[in-house]
Structures are given as structure tokens and as C-alpha cells.
């Protein structure tokens, strides 16, 4: 099968492929960053920093 | 014998941070996403005047408003679809170098990140001023439209992933929901862009039909505004349809739009839950593709719901809410650029016109049913005139 030149590199890495444990880990990283950013911005407001 | 990337990842994984590649590996891709985002939108903190958003705003000024709405907003230009269009152009005209691809994979982290940070945007309390009957109508129209679209898709044997994306966009009246549902439904990028095209096209048809039908039924301006919000495509299309009827109807559409907007998460959550339960019930059915690969309710979606509840309790007050939404604009602009780069024109055309037929059928029935219900409610006094 020919590789999708938009998404897959010469080593076979497909950047739009997202499954299994790697997907869960990416979700976890996104979740942690989202919670961190929202907590910092909300805390800044409650502490009167802006 | 070759080893699958998934097995290789599992073997080398040490923590969730293993999913982040080295800085040198991701830098070219991140820079590509950054440049696409910065030249697509007027992003907070970036004083770049040469953006697609400004170009379209200038063209809007040349063309003039269509019933008080900018033409390109009616055609769905916004902070998600501008970078997607730019990424699509870059990817198809210049190609996507291999060096970018590790960095572009951060789209999978950016999607849950952006969706969770959207939660403070939907404060249900803002809709209470509308009264009980319009809020109930908003909720019923949203869930009804989603169910109707999924039924129409079953009737026309449309790929269930494509159907779910159209259902999300059509029911919430916000084609952003198509992108939000992409990681939840496990839809292909081409299906998402095709679905947005279907939702926008059906919205344009409804935008032209509603003022005529509303006038023929003799709906009061107030409730023609409500019908526009619940029965016509995106926000600008809804407002344009209402203003085409009368200035008062347009003003009322702006008033009622809050009800649709704050309930939007319920629309895409409903579509996800329906498709997820269906997948659980029919695990062995090869025709069931939506949510395939998602074995349990995603934790990050649970966090989104939790944050939405906190937003409804007014935990995120105005300055923090705006700062968080500015980050959402950054996040979705970067992710949409990566999505645009991943697609060829053929990917978008591949799902064909069946999606358009489903959206048109569901959109027409929704508009007819909505007008009938609103006319009935006005006649019986459930909606006071």
C-alpha cells in the first residue's frame, strides 16, 4: 500500500495515527496541561493579579 | 519482520511523557503550525496585520454585509476554519516535509487540551433570562436534530463516523462541534471537512428559506428569531436569516442565540454517547466504525463535563474566562493548521455527496418541524406574543 505523503514519513511514522497506549498518554498530557493552565489563570484572578 | 509503531511505543514507554518527542524532533512541525496559525488568525498577543482573517474582513468590507452579517462569517470563516484552509493550501501546494511530522503529531494533545479549556465558555445561567419554554425548545431542537440526522444517515447508509460529525454540527448550529467530535468519534479528517461543507451548505439553504416560510406562517418577529437560531446553520447564517425577515427578528435572534450556545456541549456529548453506546452494543458489527478504538468513556471528556459544571456554578469569572478562551483560540488555531496539512483534496471529496443528502434531509425536516412547533406554541400561548 502506498504511503500517504501528507501524513506519513519515510520511516512509516504517521502523525495522524493515534491509538492504544500512546493515545491515552497524549490525552493525559493534554488533560494535565489544560487543568494546570485553567487553575493558574483562575487562581491569578482570585488572588487579584489581574 | 517489522514491528508496529504501537508495540514499539509500549516497549519504550516510561511514563505518559513518553508520548512527547524531543524538542529538536518537534520544533520544525511546531514552527509550521505556529506560522500557519499566526498568518490565519488575529491571535491574542500577536500584532500581525497580514492574516487571512484580516484579508477576509477587508473583502467583507468590499462586498458589504449580507443582512447585517459579514459574508465570510456566513461562509464559516472563523478561528478554526481559517488555519485549516491555510494548512490545506500549504499542504496541497507545497507538500508536507517529513521533518514536520513529529511536531504535527502534537495535534492529538492539543485537541483534548482545547476542548477541556472550552468548558468555561458555556455558562448555562446566561440563558435563564430567556424563560423556561425557549430553553426547553433549544434543548429539544438540539437533541431532536441530532437524532434525526443519525436516523437519516441510517436510512441512506452513510458511514456512521461521517453521520455523527454531521449530526454534531447540524444539531448544535456550530460547525466547530464537527472538529470537537473528531477525536471522540475517531472520524477521518476528510470526513470532518466534508461534514462542515454539508452543514454550511444546508445552513445557507435554510437561511434563504426561513424568512419566506416564517413570513408565510405569520410568525411574530420574536419567534422567527428563535426559529432562525434553532433551524439555521451557523450563528452568522441564523442572524442573517432573521435580519432578512425584519430588523426586530434579527435582534431577537441575537437574544435567543445564548440559549443555543450555552447548551452546545450537551449536543455534542449526546452524539458521542449515542455512538459510544451503539458501539458497545454492537462490538462485532464491522459496519460500526464510530468510536471504534475507544473502550471506555474518555477521562478527559469527564474532566470537560466537570469543568462545565464548575462554569455553570460561575467559578470562572470574566477575566479568567477570557484569558482561558484566548488560549483556546491559540490551541485550535495550531491544531487546525496540522489537520489542514494532513489532508489532500481527494480526502475531502472521498466521502462523496451522500453526507450532503443526509444533512439536507435532516435539515429540511428539522426546519419544518421547528416552525410547526413554534407556530403551535404561539397559537396556544405557550410562547407569549
Image (spheres, coloured by chain):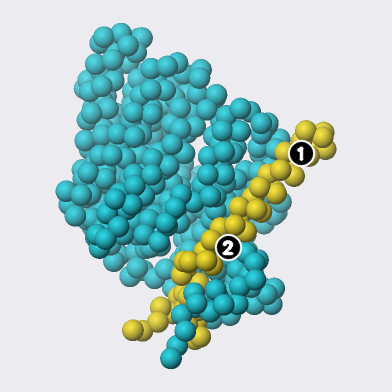
Chain colours: A yellow, B cyan
* Percent x, y of residue B4: 46, 80
Crowding at dot 2, Cα within 10 Å, few <14 / some 14-19 / many 20+, comes out as many
Residue B321 visible, this angle: yes
Residue nearest the viewer, comparing B210 with B229: B229
Residue nearest the viewer, comparing B310 with A8: B310
Q: Is A28 situated above or below A9?
A: above
* Percent x, y of residue A47: 82, 35
Left or right side of B346 for B118: right
Q: Residue at x 32, y 11 (%)?
A: B382
Crowding at dot 1, Cα within 10 Å, few <14 / some 14-19 / many 20+, comes out as some
Residue B89 visible, this angle: no
The reply to whether discs 2 and 1 touch (Cβ–Cβ < 8 Å) is no
* Percent x, y of residue A6: 45, 75
Chain identifier of the residue bearing label 1 in the image: A
Chain identifier of the residue bearing label 2 in the image: A
For the C terminus of chain B, which image quadrant? top left
Compare marks 2 and 1 and give the one earlier in the sequence. Answer: 2
Q: Residue at x 22, y 38 (%)?
A: B364
Identify the residue position indicated by label 2 in the image: A25
Q: Secondary structure at mark 2?
A: helix
Left or right side of A2 for A22: right
Q: Is B317 situated above or below B300?
A: above
Q: Which mark is residue B141?
A: none
Q: Residue furthest bottom?
A: B1
Residue nearest the viewer, comparing B73 with B112: B112
- Give residue A48's quadrant in the image: top right
Q: Residue at x 45, y 88 (%)?
A: B2
**Separation of marks 2 and 1 at Cα, in angstroms:** 27 Å
Identify the residue position indicated by label 1 in the image: A43
Q: Secondary structure at mark 1?
A: helix
* Percent x, y of residue B7: 50, 77
Amino acid at each position: 500500500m502506498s504511503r500517504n505523503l501528507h501524513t506519513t514519513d519515510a520511516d512509516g511514522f504517521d502523525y495522524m495515527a493515534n491509538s492504544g497506549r500512546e493515545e491515552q498518554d497524549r490525552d493525559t498530557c493534554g488533560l494535565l496541561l489544560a487543568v494546570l493552565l485553567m487553575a493558574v489563570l483562575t487562581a491569578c484572578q482570585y488572588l487579584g493579579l489581574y | 519482520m517489522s514491528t508496529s509503531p504501537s508495540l514499539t511505543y509500549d516497549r519504550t514507554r516510561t511514563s505518559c511523557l513518553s508520548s512527547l518527542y524531543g524538542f529538536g524532533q518537534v520544533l520544525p512541525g511546531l514552527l509550521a503550525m505556529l506560522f500557519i496559525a499566526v498568518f490565519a488568525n488575529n491571535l491574542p498577543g500577536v500584532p500581525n496585520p497580514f492574516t487571512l482573517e484580516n484579508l477576509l474582513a477587508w473583502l467583507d468590507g468590499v462586498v458589504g454585509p449580507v443582512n447585517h452579517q459579514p459574508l465570510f462569517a456566513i461562509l464559516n470563516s472563523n478561528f478554526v476554519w481559517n488555519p485549516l484552509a491555510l494548512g490545506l493550501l500549504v499542504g496541497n501546494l507545497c507538500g508536507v516535509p517529513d521533518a514536520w511530522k513529529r511536531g504535527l503529531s502534537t495535534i492529538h494533545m492539543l485537541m483534548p487540551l482545547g476542548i477541556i479549556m472550552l468548558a468555561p465558555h458555556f455558562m448555562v445561567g446566561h440563558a435563564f433570562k430567556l424563560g423556561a419554554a425557549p430553553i426547553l425548545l433549544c434543548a429539544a431542537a438540539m437533541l431532536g436534530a441530532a437524532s434525526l440526522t443519525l436516523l437519516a444517515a441510517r436510512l441512506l447508509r452513510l458511514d456512521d463516523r461521517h453521520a455523527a460529525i454531521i449530526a454534531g454540527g447540524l444539531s448544535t448550529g456550530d460547525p466547530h462541534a464537527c472538529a470537537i467530535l473528531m477525536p471522540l468519534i475517531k472520524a477521518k479528517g476528510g470526513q470532518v471537512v466534508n461534514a462542515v461543507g454539508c452543514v454550511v451548505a444546508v445552513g445557507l439553504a435554510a437561511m434563504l428559506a426561513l424568512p419566506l416560510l416564517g413570513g408565510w406562517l405569520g410568525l411574530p418577529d420574536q419567534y422567527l428569531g428563535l426559529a432562525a437560531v434553532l433551524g439555521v446553520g451557523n450563528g452568522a447564517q441564523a442572524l442573517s436569516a432573521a435580519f432578512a425577515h425584519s430588523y426586530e427578528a434579527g435582534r431577537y435572534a441575537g437574544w435567543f442565540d445564548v440559549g443555543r450556545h450555552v447548551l452546545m456541549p450537551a449536543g455534542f456529548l449526546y452524539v458521542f454517547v449515542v455512538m459510544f453506546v451503539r458501539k458497545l452494543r454492537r462490538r462485532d458489527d464491522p459496519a460500526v466504525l464510530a468510536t471504534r478504538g475507544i473502550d471506555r468513556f474518555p477521562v478527559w471528556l469527564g474532566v470537560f463535563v466537570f469543568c462545565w459544571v464548575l462554569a455553570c456554578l460561575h467559578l470562572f469569572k470574566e477575566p479568567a474566562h477570557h484569558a482561558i478562551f484566548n488560549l483556546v483560540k491559540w490551541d485550535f488555531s495550531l491544531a487546525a493548521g496540522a489537520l489542514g496539512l494532513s489532508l489532500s483534496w481527494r480526502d475531502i471529496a472521498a466521502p462523496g455527496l451522500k453526507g450532503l443528502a443526509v444533512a439536507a434531509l435532516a435539515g429540511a425536516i428539522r426546519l419544518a418541524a421547528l416552525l410547526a412547533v413554534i407556530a403551535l406554541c404561539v397559537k396556544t400561548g405557550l410562547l407569549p406574543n
